[in-house]
C-alpha cells in the first residue's frame, strides 16, 4: 500500500456552472503534495470530498486503500486543518485535549501540551481570545497530536505572518521525517511550496491542469521575455501561454535549457509558481500540460 | 461520541451559571404556589441545547466534526444524548427545588409536584423529538423559529384540549402507573423515530 | 560540511550534488562516511525530498556514493580513484591542446609553467 490517497473518476457538480472533475489522482505515501489554484478553482471542494464533508459525488476515493464505507477507520489516521472550521471558540485548549482524548485512540495529551508550550499558547485561554496566527497554530497542534499518518490541510498558513509561516513549515518538515507520513496541503502562498513540496497539483476551474514534481516544474519551465517584434519570431509550438504587457511580452516555455539554446539572445528567466499560475490562468493561448 | 458529549457540556458550562440565576428568580416568584415554576426545566433545557447548536453553526463545527472518526454517526447521537442529559439534570434540580421550597412554604403537594415534573419531562422530550430533525435539516436560525412555533402550538393545543375535551381520570392523574407506562412508551418511541430521521438527514447533508 | 543553495537559477538538485562532490573531494566527507539521510537533509535545507533523492541517485550513478538498503548512503572513494583518473585524463587532454597552441605561437615551456603557477596561486588567494 504505497498510496495515501487514490482518486478515480471523481465528478462533483454544483448547480451553478461549477464542476470538479478528477479522472485520476494518486498521492504517494511519504510525500508533501501542494495543491494550488485560484479561489473557487476547486481546491476546497476536492479536500471536502476527500474528507467526506461533501459526500454526494460520482467516482471513487480511497484513503490508505480503504473506501468511503470504511471511512471511519481511515479517519483515525488523518489529521485535519480546515479554513475557519474548528471547535466552538468559547472552549479552551485544555478542553480540546479532554474532548479529543475520547475521540482518537492515539491522542497524546503530553504531545499536545508540548506543542502548546512551544507555541506559547495558554491552555486556559478561550480560543476566541487568540490571535489568528495563534489560533492556526492551535489547529495544527491539534491535528498533529493524535499522530496521524496523513495531514490534509486547507490553507494552513493563510493570514499568517512570514515568521509564523516559517515556524509552521519547519513543523511540517519535522513531521515528514517519518517516511510513513504524508501531507496534502492547499495554499495560495506558493512560495511556501516552492521549497518543500515534492509534488505540485494545479487546479483551475475544476480541472487538474498540472500534476508534476516540483523539480519538473521549476527546473523545466521558464519565462521568455521579449518585445513585440521579437515575439513574432517565436515558434508557435514553443509558446505554452503568454501575457502581453505594456512594454514586454512574457511567454511561458517548457524545457528551459533547449529553449535558451534555440533563442540564444533572449532572456529566459526562472519561473516561480506564482508566475506559472498567473500565466496559465490569465495568459492567452492556454494548453493543457501533461 | 463521549468526546462530543463532553464538548457540548463544556460549551454550556458558562451558560449554566446564568440560567441557574434565572431559575432561582423563578423559584422565588412561584413560592406562592404559582405553577410557572414547573416549566423551568423545559425552558432551560431548550435554551441550552439551542446554544450548543448555535455555537456549532457559528464555528462551522460540523465540517470539522465530520472529519473525526465516526463523525457523522456520532454527531447526531451525541446531540440527543447530551440534550437528554441536560433535561434530566434540569428536572432533577427542579424536583429537589420544588421539594425544598414546598417544605419551606408548607405548601408541598407531592402528587402535584410529580404530575408537573412528568409533564415537563415529556414535554421536553417531545420538543426535542419535533425540533431536532428540523434543526438538522434547516439550521439553527430557522430551527429556532420552528421551535417557537412548536412550543406555542403545543401550549395552544393543550389549552384547547383542556377546555373542550374532558380527559379521562387516568390520564389526568399521571401519577397512576398504568397511564405513566403508556405515555412513557409513546414518548420514547417518538424520540427514537426522531433520532432515526435526524440521523438520515445528517447523513445526507453536505457542508 | 557546507551546503549552500542559491537562487541563481541552477536546479537545486545540481547544487546539492556539486556541494556534496566538493565535500567528498576535499575530504570533508571521508571514505565510507555516512551521508545525512535524504529526509533529514531535505528538512535542514528546506527542500523537497524528491530533489535530494535525485541528487543522491545521480551521485550513486556517477560512483561517488553507495546506498545500502536500510542503512543509508556512504561515500565511496574507490570510484573516486577512478574519477580522479578520468579527470586527470581530461586535464591531460586540455594540456596537450594548450601545449600545441604554445608551440604554434612560440610561447616557451617556462612561460607556460609560470602561468600555471600564477593561476594556482591566485586561486588560493581567492
Image: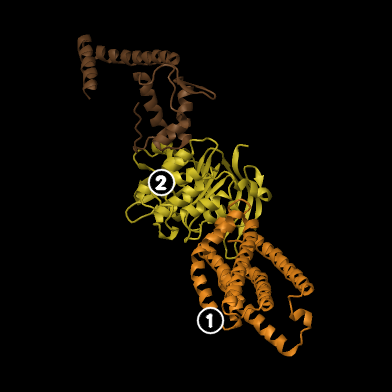
> Is B125 on the left or on the right of C84, as rendered?
right
Vertical relation: A124 (above or below) C104: below
Q: Which chain is orange?
A: B
Residue A252, can we see it? Answer: no
Q: Which residue is mark 1?
A: B29
Q: Which chain is yellow?
A: A
Vertical relation: B42 (above or below) A107: below
> Is A277 on the left or on the right of C3, as rendered?
right
Measuring 43% from the left and 24% from the top, which residue is drawn there?
C35
Residue C91 picture quarter: top left
Q: Which residue is mark 2?
A: A117
> Is A180 on the left or on the right of A155, as rendered?
right
Vertical relation: C95 (above or below) B91: above
Q: CA distance from mark 1 to mark 2?
A: 50 Å
Q: Nearer the viewer, residue A181 or B65?
A: B65
For chain C, what colour was chosen? Answer: brown
Chain letter belonging to callout 2? A
**The C terminus of chain A, quarter of image:** top right
Amino acid at each position: 500500500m504505497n498510496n495515501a490517497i487514490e482518486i478515480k473518476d471523481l465528478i462533483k457538480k454544483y448547480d451553478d456552472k461549477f464542476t470538479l472533475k478528477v479522472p485520476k489522482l494518486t498521492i504517494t505515501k511519504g510525500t508533501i503534495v501542494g495543491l494550488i489554484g485560484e479561489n473557487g478553482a476547486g481546491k476546497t471542494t476536492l479536500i471536502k470530498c476527500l474528507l467526506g464533508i461533501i459526500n454526494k459525488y460520482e467516482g471513487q476515493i480511497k484513503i490508505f486503500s480503504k473506501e468511503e464505507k470504511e471511512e471511519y477507520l481511515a479517519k483515525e489516521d488523518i489529521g485535519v486543518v480546515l479554513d475557519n472550521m474548528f471547535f466552538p471558540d468559547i472552549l479552551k485548549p485544555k478542553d480540546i485535549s479532554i474532548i479529543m482524548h475520547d475521540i482518537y485512540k492515539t491522542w497524546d495529551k503530553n504531545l499536545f501540551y508540548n506543542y502548546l508550550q512551544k507555541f506559547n499558547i495558554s491552555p486556559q485561554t478561550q480560543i476566541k481570545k487568540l490571535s489568528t496566527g495563534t489560533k492556526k497554530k492551535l489547529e495544527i497542534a491539534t491535528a498533529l497530536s493524535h499522530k496521524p499518518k496523513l495531514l490534509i490541510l486547507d490553507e494552513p498558513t493563510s493570514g499568517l505572518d512570514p515568521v509564523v509561516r516559517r515556524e509552521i513549515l519547519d513543523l511540517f518538515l519535522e513531521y515528514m521525517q517519518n517516511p510513513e507520513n504524508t501531507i496534502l496541503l492547499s495554499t495560495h502562498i506558493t512560495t511556501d511550496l516552492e521549497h518543500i513540496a515534492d509534488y505540485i497539483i494545479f487546479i483551475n476551474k475544476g480541472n487538474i491542469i498540472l500534476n508534476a514534481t516540483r523539480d519538473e516544474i521549476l527546473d523545466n519551465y521558464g519565462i521568455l521575455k521579449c518585445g513585440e517584434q521579437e515575439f513574432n519570431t517565436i515558434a508557435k509550438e514553443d509558446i505554452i501561454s503568454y501575457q502581453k504587457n505594456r512594454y514586454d511580452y512574457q511567454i511561458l516555455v517548457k524545457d528551459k535549457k533547449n529553449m535558451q539554446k534555440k533563442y540564444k539572445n533572449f532572456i529566459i528567466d526562472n519561473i516561480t509558481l506564482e508566475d506559472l499560475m498567473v500565466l496559465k490562468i490569465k495568459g492567452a493561448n492556454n494548453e493543457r500540460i501533461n | 461520541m463521549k468526546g462530543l458529549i463532553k464538548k457540548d457540556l463544556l460549551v454550556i458550562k458558562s451558560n449554566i451559571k446564568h440560567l441557574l440565576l434565572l431559575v432561582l428568580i423563578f423559584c422565588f416568584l412561584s413560592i406562592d404556589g404559582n405553577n410557572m415554576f414547573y416549566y423551568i426545566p423545559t425552558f432551560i433545557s431548550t435554551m441550552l441545547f439551542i446554544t450548543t447548536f448555535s455555537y456549532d453553526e457559528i464555528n462551522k463545527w460540523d465540517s470539522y466534526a465530520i472529519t473525526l472518526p465516526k463523525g457523522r454517526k456520532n454527531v447526531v447521537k451525541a446531540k440527543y444524548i447530551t440534550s437528554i442529559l441536560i433535561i434530566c439534570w434540569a428536572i432533577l434540580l427542579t424536583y429537589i427545588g420544588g421539594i425544598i421550597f414546598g417544605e419551606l412554604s408548607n405548601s408541598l403537594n407531592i402528587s402535584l409536584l410529580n404530575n408537573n415534573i412528568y409533564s415537563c419531562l415529556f414535554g421536553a422530550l417531545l420538543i426535542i423529538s419535533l425540533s431536532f430533525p428540523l434543526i438538522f435539516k434547516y439550521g439553527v436560525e430557522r430551527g429556532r423559529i420552528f421551535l417557537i412555533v412548536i412550543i406555542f402550538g403545543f401550549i395552544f393545543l393543550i389549552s384547547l384540549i383542556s377546555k373542550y375535551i374532558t380527559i379521562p381520570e387516568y390520564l389526568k392523574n399521571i401519577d397512576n402507573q398504568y397511564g405513566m407506562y403508556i405515555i412513557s412508551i409513546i414518548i420514547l418511541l417518538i424520540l427514537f423515530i426522531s433520532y432515526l430521521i435526524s440521523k438520515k438527514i445528517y447523513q445526507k447533508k453536505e457542508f | 560540511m557546507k551546503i549552500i543553495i542559491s537562487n541563481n537559477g541552477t536546479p537545486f538538485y545540481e547544487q546539492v550534488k556539486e556541494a556534496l562532490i566538493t565535500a567528498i573531494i576535499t575530504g570533508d566527507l571521508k571514505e565510507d562516511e555516512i551521508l545525512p539521510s535524504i529526509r533529514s537533509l531535505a528538512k535542514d535545507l528546506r527542500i523537497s525530498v524528491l530533489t535530494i533523492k535525485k541528487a543522491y541517485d545521480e551521485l550513486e550513478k556517477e560512483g561517488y556514493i553507495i546506498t545500502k538498503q536500510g542503512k543509508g548512503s556512504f561515500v565511496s572513494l574507490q570510484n573516486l580513484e577512478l574519477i580522479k583518473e578520468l579527470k586527470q585524463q581530461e586535464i591531460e587532454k586540455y594540456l596537450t591542446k594548450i601545449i600545441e597552441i604554445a608551440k604554434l605561437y612560440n610561447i616557451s615551456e617556462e612561460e607556460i609553467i609560470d602561468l600555471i603557477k600564477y593561476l594556482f596561486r591566485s586561486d588560493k588567494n581567492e
